[in-house]
């Protein structure tokens, strides 16, 4: 991406994850910025108040564009309010930022970016719906001297497009390690495995997730893998299918066809909770009981937590969104003030997965957490990411009590 010119604002665009250095082309700080790092943030948002002087030194607006309201409720329930709280705590006034949602339409996301820039955005934080619109927004922002932060999904085009997310390969590794542990704990013998990957057709993050879990399960980062692949631990891969566009209903159809053709499938790997629930629904309809056929996921949805507590899902990767929101706003604040972000914040790089066009970009990567029934109360419940009362209403009070959850 092009460097933000003096006097321009910042645009944030959001999407669905080595130690990097800050780019040498960034302008020098006019004053020493606070030394925030990826470990500075917590649920109190206290770290953001350290940025008030940096916010005061900045010019232009921050534009925030979230991708949709259908692929996950997170963008309404968490990202938008957390980003706004981070902005306000960092000293932004209501006129200094604008938060929109593209409602899943590429043309809308690009139009929102163009409108934000026309209204004085110097920094854009955006979550690209897919790589196509990500490249379009990047090119437009670069041509107008606006700094770009790709939020949650990477944009690999341009020079020095920043990326804020959780480590996507690590997300996949947690899924793979959790699956391996579950196969053992659920006493699955001679595992015949089916994998339901995410939308690798449009989302490079889905490729990184699969690289992570394949490395843990099969000892290779190749994705998708051919049927018949065997692991060193005695697993046999029955099939490995991509779910186009992450559409859960399509995933359900794919798994129904596979399970009908291969009733020997006794272990499954899914890239997120939505796909896991699609598989669980099929299994329940086939009369498969709890703790018989493992499923996996990410996003720590209430449905995923329900399936975990009821014994149909091994675990889910939890990505505390309040960390991601603060991280993105902190980075935007430095860029808006023409200050070089600390290397402790821009702590990594992200590289396009094999087969994906683009180049390496500076990144700020946070650490995800694998959630099971054993630590659910101390993670998603403690953080109020999942409402205890609502969860317990779906699984019964006794199940919650057994997991240490008080509604």
Image (tube, rainbow, N blue to C red):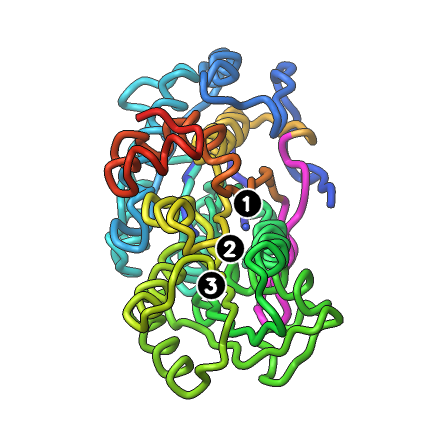
Residue 140 appears in view: no
Q: Earlier in the sequence, mark 3 or mark 2?
A: 2
Q: Which residue is mark 1?
A: 163
CB atoms of marks 1 and 2 within 8 Å: yes
Horizontal and vertical percent position of residue 265: 49, 77
* Depth check, front residue: 111 or 286: 286
Q: Report whether 37 appears left or right of 407.
A: right
Residue underneath mark 3: 292
Give the percent coordinates (x, y) of residue 311.
42, 52
* Magenta segment: 345-362
Quarter of the image with the C terminus in it: top left
Q: Nearer the viewer, mark 3 or mark 2?
A: 3
Q: Distance of mark 3 from mark 2, alpha carbons?
A: 39 Å
Up the image or down, 7 lies above or below 236; here it is above
**What's the magenta bit mostly, secondary-structure-wise?**
loop
Task: Please determine whether, in this image, residue 170 is positioned above or below residue 135.
Answer: above
| Nearest to N terminus: mark 1 or mark 2 | 2
For image coordinates 60% across by 83% down, the residue present is 226
Which quadrant of the structure image shows residue 279?
A: bottom left
Q: Which mark is residue 155?
A: 2
Relative to 157, is 112 above or below? above
Q: Earlier in the sequence, mark 1 or mark 3?
A: 1
Residue 109 percent coordinates (x, y): 30, 53
- Spatial CA distance of label 1 from label 2 is 7 Å
Residue reaching furthest bottom?
261
The magenta stretch spans residue 27: no
At a point 43% along the width and 25% down the height, the residue shown is: 382
């Amino acid at each position: 991406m092009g460097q933000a010119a003096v006097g321009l604002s910042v645009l944030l665009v959001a999407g669905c994850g080595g130690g990097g250095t800050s780019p040498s082309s960034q302008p020098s700080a006019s004053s020493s910025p606070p030394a925030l790092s990826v470990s500075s943030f917590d649920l109190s948002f206290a770290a953001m108040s350290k940025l008030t002087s940096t916010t005061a030194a900045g010019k232009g607006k921050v534009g925030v564009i979230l991708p949709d309201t259908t692929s996950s409720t997170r963008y309404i329930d968490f990202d938008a309010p957390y980003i706004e709280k981070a902005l306000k705590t960092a000293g932004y006034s209501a006129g200094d930022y604008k938060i929109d949602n593209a409602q899943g339409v590429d043309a809308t996301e690009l139009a929102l970016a163009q409108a934000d820039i026309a209204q004085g955005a110097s920094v854009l934080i955006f979550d690209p719906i897919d790589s196509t619109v990500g490249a379009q927004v990047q090119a437009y922002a670069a041509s107008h001297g606006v700094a770009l932060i790709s939020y949650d999904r990477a944009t690999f085009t341009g020079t020095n497009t920043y990326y804020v997310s959780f480590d996507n390969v690590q997300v996949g590794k947690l899924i793979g390690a959790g699956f391996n542990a579950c196969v053992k704990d659920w006493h699955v013998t001679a595992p015949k495995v089916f994998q339901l990957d995410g939308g690798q057709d449009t989302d490079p993050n889905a490729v990184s997730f699969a690289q992570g879990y394949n490395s843990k399960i099969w000892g290779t980062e190749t994705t998708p893998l051919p049927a018949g692949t065997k692991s060193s631990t005695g697993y046999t891969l029955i099939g490995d299918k991509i779910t186009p566009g992450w559409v859960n209903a399509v995933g359900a159809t794919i798994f129904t066809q596979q399970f009908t053709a291969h009733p020997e499938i006794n272990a499954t790997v899914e890239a997120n909770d939505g796909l896991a629930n699609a598989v669980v629904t099929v299994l329940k309809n086939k009369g498969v009981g709890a703790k018989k056929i493992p499923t996996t996921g990410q996003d720590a949805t209430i449905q995923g937590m329900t399936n975990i507590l009821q014994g149909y899902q091994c675990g889910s990767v939890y990505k505390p969104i309040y960390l991601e929101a603060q991280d993105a706003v902190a980075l935007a604040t430095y860029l808006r003030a023409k200050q070089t972000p600390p290397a402790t914040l821009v702590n990594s790089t992200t590289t396009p997965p094999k087969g994906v066009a683009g180049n390496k970009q500076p990144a700020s990567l946070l650490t995800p957490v694998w959630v099971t029934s054993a630590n659910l109360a101390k993670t998603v419940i403690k953080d109020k990411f999942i409402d205890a009362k609502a969860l317990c209403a779906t699984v019964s009070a006794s199940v919650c009590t057994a997991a240490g959850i008080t509604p």
